[in-house]
């Protein structure tokens, strides 16, 4: 099973040396994967032009990082989050923003906007040609349980899919289109769980089975439970936010994980919201990930994070299995 770590590079810059030190830590503590979260509303971590742009990575830097990761047996996963979390990139393409979202989300009804994103994805693939897994995000696109606040999206869905459309159909089809595109390029595609198979809002368009689901939260009652995903036939990856989220600034109600807390509360069969799977159900789980999110990027330095991880990662490895 995979034992991975996600690092938020969209909001906090890590130097190439610091990322290499992180890879060494992962290898030392028998983790297998490093997921690079490349974009947020505040920034985008890659520099496609290879010009001198501060706090982004050139092709040559990523090539060096890829070689280093391979040398130390760590698999890199590029993570490009859309159609939400897109404010930074939409600054150059405001015409592609979905109305009623304060230019934070892409208009999934606009094929030109989707083609623009597919081009970005292809450029990311060029940066990570050997990565077999690609995470396309899909989380926090809109306030899912208040679809009436997005009349443009709802009306567009009903125009195309009929009066019974719930407003999510274009969103589902968008994810399906990205998944098809990446699957045709030989990639395994991953998404976050919160927007799909919801109890409160169903889509007339089904979600493709080509995606693997990173289950990070169950904080809102409309979200599908873990076992609903299993019953629907999807593979899962556990990103349990209750135990495995290291959120800088302790934003959104999170507190920093500690070795003691993880020792007392962590369990390989436990998912967000105190959901538990039995050993047979765990056969559909590909792995577990620890996440470093930069909600308040200056709350801690990278050096402080790297100093704290050796206290936590041995417990993570102990609970979630060795390589």
Image: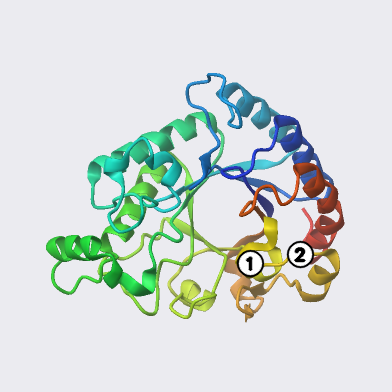
**In terms of secondary structure, where does tag 2 sit?**
loop
Horizontal and vertical percent position of residue 184:
38, 41
Quarter of the N terminus within the rendering: bottom right
Identified at 48% across, 48% down, the residue is 41
Residue at numbered disc 2: 257
CA–CA distance between discs 2 and 1?
10 Å
Give the camera-side residue of 146 and 192.
Answer: 146
The local crowd at label 2, few if under 14, some if 14 to 19, many if 20 or more residues have their Cα within 10 Å, is some
Above or below residue 125? Residue 51 is above
Residue extending farthest to the top is 51
Quarter occupied by residue 319? bottom right
Identified at 72% across, 37% down, the residue is 19
Horizontal and vertical percent position of residue 116:
32, 37
* Residue 154 shown left or right of residue 94 in the figure: left
Identified at 26% across, 42% down, the residue is 95
Quarter occupied by residue 218? bottom right
Q: Residue 206 shows which numbered tag? A: none
Residue at numbered disc 1: 241
* Residue 64 shown left or right of residue 24 in the figure: left
Give the camera-side residue of 246 and 284.
Answer: 246
Horizontal and vertical percent position of residue 132:
54, 42
The numbered mark, 2 or 1, whose residue comes first in the sequence reads 1
Q: Can residue 47 be seen by looking at this rendering? A: yes
């Amino acid at each position: 099973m995979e034992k991975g770590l996600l690092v938020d590079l969209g909001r906090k810059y890590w130097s190439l040396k610091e990322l290499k030190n992180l890879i060494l830590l992962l290898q030392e503590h028998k983790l297998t994967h490093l997921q690079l979260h490349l974009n947020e509303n505040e920034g985008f971590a890659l520099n496609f032009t290879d010009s001198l742009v501060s706090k982004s990575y050139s092709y040559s830097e990523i090539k060096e990082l890829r070689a280093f990761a391979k040398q130390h047996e760590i698999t890199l996963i590029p993570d490009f989050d859309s159609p939400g979390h897109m404010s930074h990139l939409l600054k150059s393409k405001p015409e592609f923003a979905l109305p009623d979202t304060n230019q934070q989300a892409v208009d999934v009804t606009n094929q030109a906007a989707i083609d623009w994103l597919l081009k970005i994805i292809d450029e990311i693939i060029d940066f990570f040609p050997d990565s077999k897994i690609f995470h396309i995000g899909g989380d926090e696109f809109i306030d899912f349980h208040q679809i009436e606040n997005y009349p443009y999206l709802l009306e567009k869905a009903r125009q195309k899919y009929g009066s019974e459309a719930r407003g999510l159909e274009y969103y589902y089809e968008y994810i399906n289109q990205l998944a098809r595109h990446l699957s045709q390029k030989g990639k395994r595609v991953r998404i976050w769980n919160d927007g799909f198979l919801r109890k409160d809002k169903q889509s007339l368009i089904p979600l493709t089975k080509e995606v693997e689901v990173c289950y990070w939260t169950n904080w809102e009652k409309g979200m599908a439970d873990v076992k609903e995903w299993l019953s629907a036939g999807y593979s899962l990856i556990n990103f349990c936010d209750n135990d495995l989220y290291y959120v800088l600034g302790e934003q959104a109600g999170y507190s920093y994980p500690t070795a003691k807390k993880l020792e007392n509360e962590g369990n390989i069969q436990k998912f967000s919201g105190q959901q538990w799977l039995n050993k047979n159900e765990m056969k559909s789980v590909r792995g577990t990930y620890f996440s470093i999110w930069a909600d308040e990027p200056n709350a801690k330095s990278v050096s402080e994070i790297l100093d704290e991880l050796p206290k936590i990662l041995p417990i993570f490895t102990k609970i979630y299995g060795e390589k």
